[in-house]
Image (cartoon, rainbow, N blue to C red):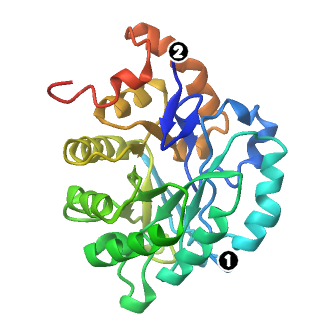
């Protein structure tokens, strides 16, 4: 059985990638299992300067997932490249995916240029859910003009593949995906979190300090599948599917919708062995559904495939 996947010339032994923000900088999980079984690792979102993140509380449990408003807490690009990635390289031999965030095009450029020179990084994942402070706080991923301008600027100077992590909090995800393709992006990550909230019945106030946050977990899977399916129909860029993946069956479903690989997010916070269990069970599920090569099922749910 062939589980190897090619993402813009980054060869993954399997399509399983822990999602950014749910796996730290990777090495923290090495006490649970050999990280080298993973296809790749998407690092915690990184900004030019260290960020503490949003005030507490910034996590709220839900019946079918969780809400977070962590606010991109990270030690900054210099510390990530100088300390975090070297720690990861001690326990992980493959190239990783660096998640780039910022509040302006200059922020993205600073981080992307630094990661572009880092041998341990194979792909840059551009988180466009960040608010642009120069444009009234609108997220890059919610404006066609801002998104296009950002990608074009990055493509002028970055050599490594650029995968754009799109927000589902838009009226037309296909339109935003086509903007990415036309601006020169190399791939997409679908989807980021939905905007949600919880209210504490005792205080009768929102639980999250910021009132709202990103909703993730198993409830997102049908939405993510729908968006991946729609984008695959209209766009030729490779897709990394993300949203509610808990088991190997979910991986197959995402790939049939059009994903070339997947990211596992909230499941890691519930069970630190989540990714290893999925990888272990993947050959069994492939055999059950008579799948010999994962590459042959990408987009298989579409008419004509």
Give how far across and how far down residue 271 sits, in percent: 63, 38
Give how far across and how far down residue 205 sits, in percent: 43, 76
Judged by depth in the image, the label closer to the viewer, 1 or 2, is 2
Q: Residue furthest left?
A: 303
For the point 67% across and 77% down, the residue is 52
Give residue 52's mark: 1
Please determine whether, in this image, residue 243 is positioned above or below residue 146: above
Disc 1 secondary structure class: loop
In the image: residue 7, left or right of residue 43: left
Badge 2 density bin: few <14, some 14–19, many ≥20, Cα 10 Å? some
Disc 2 secondary structure class: helix
Give how far across and how far down residue 221 sits, in percent: 35, 41
Please determine whether, in this image, residue 25 is positioned above or below residue 39: below
**Is residue 200 at least partly visible in the picture?**
no
- Distance from disc 1 to disc 2, alpha carbons, whole Å, reads 41 Å
For the point 53% across and 83% down, the residue is 106
| Residue 18 picture quarter | top right
Give how far across and how far down residue 196 sits, in percent: 37, 63
In the image: residue 20, left or right of residue 285: right
- For the image, the number of numbered tags is 2
Q: 210 and 26: which one is in front?
A: 26
Q: 62 and 110: which one is in front?
A: 110
**Is residue 134 at least partly visible in the picture?**
yes
Badge 1 density bin: few <14, some 14–19, many ≥20, Cα 10 Å? few
| Residue 304 picture quarter | top left
For the point 47% across and 74% down, the residue is 203
In the image: residue 206, left or right of residue 19: left
Query: Which mark sits nearer the N-terminus, 1 or 2?
Result: 1
Q: Where is mark 2, residue-wise?
A: 283
In the image: residue 163, left or right of residue 224: right
Which quarter of the figure is the C terminus placed in? top left
For the point 41% across and 53% down, the residue is 186
């Amino acid at each position: 059985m062939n589980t190897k996947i090619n993402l813009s010339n980054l060869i993954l032994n399997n399509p399983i990638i822990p999602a950014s923000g749910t796996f730290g900088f990777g090495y923290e999980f090495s006490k649970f299992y050999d990280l080298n079984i993973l296809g790749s690792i998407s690092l915690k979102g990184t900004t030019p300067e260290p960020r503490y993140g949003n005030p507490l509380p910034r996590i709220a449990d839900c019946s079918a997932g969780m809400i977070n408003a962590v606010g991109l807490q990270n030690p900054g690009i210099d510390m990530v490249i100088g300390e975090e990635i070297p720690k990861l390289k001690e326990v992980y031999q493959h190239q990783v995916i660096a998640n780039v965030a910022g509040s302006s095009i200059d922020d993205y450029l600073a981080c992307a240029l630094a990661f572009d020179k880092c041998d341990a990084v194979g792909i840059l994942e551009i988180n466009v859910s960040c608010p642009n402070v120069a444009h009234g706080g609108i997220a890059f991923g919610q404006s066609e003009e801002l998104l296009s301008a950002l990608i074009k600027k990055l493509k002028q100077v970055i050599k490594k593949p650029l995968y754009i992590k799109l927000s589902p909090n838009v009226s037309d995800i296909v339109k935003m995906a086509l903007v990415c393709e036309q601006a020169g992006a190399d791939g997409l990550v679908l989807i980021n979190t939905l905007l949600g909230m919880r209210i504490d019945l005792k205080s009768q106030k929102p639980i999250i300090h910021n009132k709202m946050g990103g909703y993730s977990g198993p409830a997102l899977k049908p939405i993510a599948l729908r968006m991946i399916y729609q984008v695959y129909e209209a766009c030729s860029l490779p897709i990394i599917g993300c949203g509610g993946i808990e088991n190997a069956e979910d991986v197959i479903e995402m790939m049939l919708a059009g994903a070339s690989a997947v990211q596992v997010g909230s499941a890691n916070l519930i069970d630190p062995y989540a990714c290893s269990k999925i990888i272990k069970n993947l050959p069994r599920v492939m055999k059950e559904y008579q799948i010999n090569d994962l590459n042959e099922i990408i987009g298989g749910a579409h008419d004509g495939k």
